[in-house]
Each structure stands twice: as C-alpha cells, then as structure tokens.
Image (cartoon, rainbow, N blue to C red):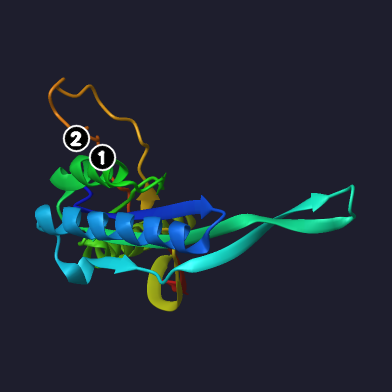
Amino acid sequence: ATPDRALVNMGIEARDTDLSAARDRVVDVSSRFLALCRTLGIDDRYIQTTGLTMHPEYRWDPKHQQRQLQGYLVQRQLSVDLRDLALLGQLIEGAVDAGVNQVNPPVLDTSRRKELRRQALAAAARDARSNAQAIANALGVSVGNVVRIDAQRLSSPPRPMMMRAEAAVADSAAASYQAGDIEIRAEVNAAFEIDND
C-alpha cells in the first residue's frame, strides 16, 4: 500500500544555568514550530505538544565528595499526524530552522490500514481452504466445515521512514523524501472436518 500519512515525533531541548532562560528558549521554539504548522495548513487537531519537563543536572565533585548543580534541562515533545506527505520535507526542514533539535524518523502509515488488513485476512482464509483442499485431494477425501480458525496479526506496523533526503534543488528550502510502500500481511490457520466420501 502506498503511505498517505506520517507520524512525525520531534523534541525541543534546552540547557542553561538559569532555569527561566532554558524554559523561555523551549517556549519560543514551540511557538515558532506551531506558527510553521499553521503556515503549512496543518490542522491543530493533528498537532500535539507535551507540557514542559524540567530537570536539574548535576555533576559529581570528587574534591568535595558531593554533587554540584550544573544547570537545568528543559524539554518538550511535539507530534504531528501529517495527512499530506508532500509537506513532509517542509515540515522537517522548517522545524529544524525554528529550533527543534530532536527529529525522529517519520513513521509512515496508510489511512486504509483496517480495510487492507481485512482484504489480507480474506485472501489468507481463501489460501487456507485451498491448501486444505490440495491435501484432501491427495488423500482421497473431501474438505468439510471449518472447525477452528485462528487469524495471526502479521500486519506490518507503521514503519519509520529512512531519513534519506534526495537531491534537492539548490534554492529549495525543503528536502523531498521517498515514501516507498507499506506491506500489509495476514496469516490464517484453519482446521476443517474431513468428509470420507
């Protein structure tokens, strides 16, 4: 299946000896990131931001045998459920330009996953009956009713996209990304009655 959406997880991290300065930097980058999303036309309901997390950072001072405060780490996680893959390059490049300093590989998916999984299950069920029929024919018996069915969840989960940017036009700010395909698989194990004709 051809992917038509991507989950893009990013983060903002700032360190400073002054907690307020680190927090203000993260808040500023968050604001610029949200403005970028609005500029790209991404609906607010597809954007999630976590609250700020703040942690003191220490180092061990062997001379005084105690830990000393080095400063503070402030973080915020951002997540975008991108429904237009044509915007993927612009989103990532723009986020980095806005100051986002952690970008995970986008996780590609298809909005048709449930439908495609059902199609894969139906094909696997037909294949199970066909295999049972081939065995029954070789043994000189007939396949009867199904007595047990077990469907395995083999559907490939949404997969992270390789972050290989293709050659971009020199004056283009956004890299283009190659999405590839997603494989949806299913396995059905079935037991049938044997009819002795």
Q: Position of residue 169 (x, y in %)?
A: 14, 22
Task: Kindly report the distance in space between the C-alpha atoms of the residues bearing marks 2 and 1.
Answer: 6 Å
| Nearer the observer, 58 or 110 | 58
Rate crowding at label 2 as few (under 14), some (14 to 19) or many (20 or more) other CA atoms within 10 Å. Answer: some
Q: Position of residue 94 (x, y in %)?
A: 23, 43
- The residue located at (27%, 46%) in the rendering is 98
Q: Position of residue 31 (x, y in %)?
A: 26, 60
SS for tag 2?
A: loop
For residue 4, say whether it is visible.
yes
Q: Which residue is mark 2?
A: 174
| Nearer the observer, 50 or 53 | 53
For residue 134, say whether it is visible.
no
SS for tag 1?
A: helix
- 26 relative position to 54: left or right: left
- 44 relative position to 76: left or right: left
Q: In the figure, 88 relative to 130: above or below? A: above
Q: Position of residue 187 (x, y in %)?
A: 42, 60
- 77 relative position to 67: left or right: left
Q: In the figure, 54 relative to 59: above or below? A: below
Q: What's the mark number on residue 192?
A: none
Q: Amino acid at mark 2?
A: Ala
Q: Which residue is mark 1?
A: 93
Rate crowding at label 1 as few (under 14), some (14 to 19) or many (20 or more) other CA atoms within 10 Å. Answer: some
- The residue located at (62%, 63%) in the rendering is 56
Residue contact at pointers 2 and 1, CB within 8 angstroms? yes
| Nearer the observer, 167 or 27 | 27
Q: Quadrant of residue 188?
A: bottom left
